[in-house]
Amino acid sequence: MNNANGPAPFGTVLGHAPGNVPVYSSDYDSADDSEFPDRHSYRSYLDGVYLGHKWQCVEFARRWLYLNHGYVFEDVAMAYEIFQLTHLREVATDRQLPLHSFANGSKRLPEPGCMLVWNEGGEFSRTGHVAIVTEVFPDRLRIAEQNLGHRLWPEGQTYNRELEARTTADGHYWLRCSMHKASLLGWVIQTADEHYAEPPNDINKRLLELDIRAVDGPLDAERAWLNEANPAEAAYVEEMEGHMLSGRPEDQLRYVCISHAAEDRLKRISGEMHSLFLHATDYVLQDASRLERFNIPASIWPKIQESWNNRRNQMITGRLDFAVTPNGIKVYEYNADSASCHMETGIVQGKWARYAGCDVGWDPGSELYERLVQAWRQSDAKGLVHILRDENPEEKYHALFMQEVMEAAGLKCKVLINFEGLRWADDGNMLDADGEPINWVWKTWAWETALDQIRAECEEDEERLRDYEPGRRKDWAPRLVDVLLRKNVMVYEPLWTLIPSNKAILPVLWELFPNHPVLLQSSYDLDEKLQESGYVIKPIVGRCGANITLIDKNSTVLEETGGAFDKQNQMYQELYPLPCVDNLNIQISTFTVSGTYAGSCARTDYSTVIRWESDLMALRVVPDHDI
């Protein structure tokens, strides 16, 4: 079966699995550095869907499932983690499909197209392994896989290995692992039938405890550790009035710790929550009565629908907010078009650790910058991208950070403050001060913030709100609505992210996925069950913890925040307090990039509500035995 001349060069097609899916050599020693100069070049994408690292076993399994069935599993750190997954995502619809695992020796036999998963150890030390089952017989099983052997397959053969099998008299199906000291976990099948399936692997509650620690001090307060030659870092230092991560003097030495197991759980949950929120978005957009709950001008509903239909897979990044406690992990909301905390997570918390000499564990934000660069490389953006921001100093460094990311991805960018220099072209298009057309836009504001201004601009002119199209010169000065709602302007994040970012989506999620272990009970109306558990009143549209009221099961108001969203419609969410460590309440936020986990950070406050002025402390992931 194997090529006597040794491993085939990296990227060589070794053979084709069923469905004519190519299997590539992953002999990394032979990879051409000019073709693969950095880790970005090793990332595999198809139709904008991230499949994995070229040409690992996980990449092949995900690519085979996508090409043959149109679905993928969420990103995993190691191949053996596939055995713990509970769902697949149908890419075209973002629909969740059930996934169950069956241990080696199960009475539920493997079947062609399922995944065979090895545990970590032996030949698959640290990583485990995954293959696609191609044929099943009572005494043997055939598989296709990548990253093992790197040898050419015989002509016309659709598998590369065969494993011995034995079916016992009582119907148990056992596979013999031929690899030295390796062990088979079993097979993973897309099915709703959980008979004989392995129970979910519940995490030890202690591993969901957060901890606050401190480095040895004092630190050299005069030392500059952020690079002010970098415009984004200079703007951050200006806003913070110094080189620091935490704004509280007493917290300059402190950082938050989370276990490796908890971070792994958050990785899986983040991908799952992204899919659930998008599933709920599609559900909302199918029914006008549901969309009415979102308090979005009806005149832009068609534009949201058009955005969803045409740009469903074009989201760059969003942020999920979680409470991580020994009682479980719960999601509060999805800021699907938020720019905040990306720079702190992707740059500052890692540099703080080097400055402070914090070598405990590792930085969970270390890959965020690179993941964003890759997302922009894979985006449809072409030519000049205009970055819109206002005078807010925080938005300044957000904008400059994303400009740096885009430029690293090879895009040309220009930052505009408000609408300085914008003017109409004779053909009805819009130009910047240098006469360059506005075609691609990334904004620092959430869509809801922009909508507030759009509502004000068009309060008495619903027809204008419906009719912003190129082709004729306008007789008014360019406004926000002219930029963001024009058909020939592509905005990131897409307009449809208004829906998952609006808290009116939370009752919809509970309706669709009642009692989901990560969701909190949510409703448009206060019911008896919420009163018994305690509840939180939230405006469906709000930012930075404004206008939130926390009420316990005894009807006692625990905390109430002010803000500018007191006239918004409200929803009710089950009370689930943040964990409190050393009198600080800690919220863990994870970032999705192209729909999958890309990093995390910790927000802290003495208040029980995380707000705009809440602090950010460095987050470190530590080995489980260190918790």
Image: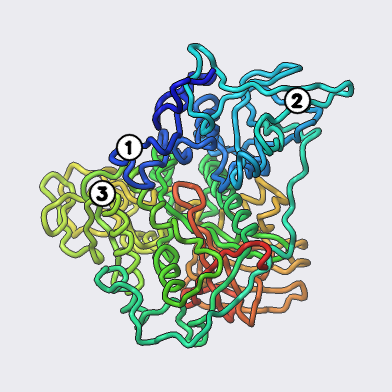
Q: Residue at x 42, y 47 (%)?
A: 315
Whole-Å distance between the Cαs marked 2 and 3? 49 Å
Picture coordinates of residue 404, whole percent (x, y): 29, 59
Nearest-to-viewer mark from 2 and 3: 2
Q: Which residue is mark 2?
A: 109
Lateral position of residue 122 relative to residue 539, left or right: right
Q: Residue at x 42, y 37 (%)?
A: 45
Q: Which residue is mark 3?
A: 410
Residue 4 appears in the rendering: yes
Mark 3: amino acid: Gly
Which of the two discs, 2 and 3, labels the residue nearer the N terminus?
2
Q: Which residue is mark 1?
A: 32
Nearest-to-viewer mark from 1 and 2: 1
Lateral position of residue 536 relative to residue 377, left or right: right
Mark 2: amino acid: Leu
Q: Quick one: SS at disc 2?
A: loop
> Which mark is drawn over residue 374?
none
Q: Nearer the viewer, residue 209 or 311?
A: 209
